[in-house]
Amino acid sequence: MYERHQPHNDLRLDTPNSHSHSAADTERNHRMTSTDDTTETPAFDTLLELLEDRYAREILKATSQHPKTVKEISDESGASPSTLYHRVKRLLEANLLMEQTRIRSDGHHDTVYAATLKHVHLTLADGSFEYRIERANEDAADRLQRLWSEF
């Protein structure tokens, strides 16, 4: 899924389905809803703040291939769990991370996190920045198959 955004008042926001929104509309709503109306796009400043944050980047990198618990991310990165939980919360709010449940063989479960961000495209054109987010989407059939294989 691709989402294209231009974060300035004199520009337009476009999605693949040719829905255009003015930047003023975006400022009123503060977040854009993607074409499937279930995934919101973070505001430009929020996206930049998160990508600038070293711990947020570590979480995204660690969860880009396989869902992981905060403890697993902490063990890999050396960051404290409390620091990571704060960043996980912000990444979830920005819809750059998704929360999942992993069932263990002993019947208990763990909360794991998976990056939803696949690509960010940033362009400087005509005196302003445009950004487009491509998300790693998993449909219900893929998720069921993955969950079943984890048993």
Image: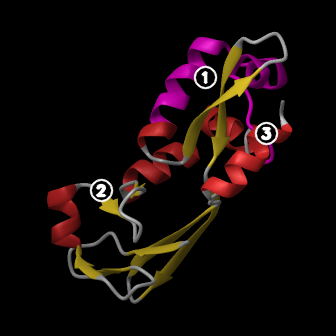
User: Dot 3: few (<14), some (14–19), or many (≥20) neighbours within 10 Å?
Assistant: few
Sequence-earlier tag: 3 or 2: 2
| Residue 84 tag number | 1
Mark 2 — residue?
A: 31
Taking 57 as reference, is 79 above or below it?
above
Name the residue located 57 percent from the left edge and 43 percent from the top edge: 97
| Residue 148 tag number | 3
In three-dimensional space, the C-alpha distance between marks 1 and 3, rounded to whole angstroms, equals: 28 Å
Relative to residue 101, is residue 132 drawn left or right? left
| In contact (CB < 8 Å): disc 1 and disc 3 | no
Residue 105 image position (x, y, % from top left): 85, 17
Name the residue located 55 percent from the left edge and 30 percent from the top edge: 88
- SS category of the residue bearing label 1: helix
Q: Is residue 83 magenta?
A: yes
Q: Is residue 14 magenta?
A: no
- SS category of the residue bearing label 2: loop
**Residue 77 visible somewhere in the drawing:** yes
Q: Nearer the viewer, mark 3 or mark 2?
A: 3
Taking 101 as reference, is 47 above or below it?
below
Question: Given the image, on which type of amino acid does mark 3 rest?
Answer: Trp
- Closer-to-camera residue (140/84): 140
Question: Given the image, on which type of amino acid does mark 2 rest?
Answer: Arg
Name the residue located 61 percent from the left edge and 52 percent from the top edge: 116
Magenta stretch, residue numbers: 65-90
Sequence-earlier tag: 2 or 1: 2
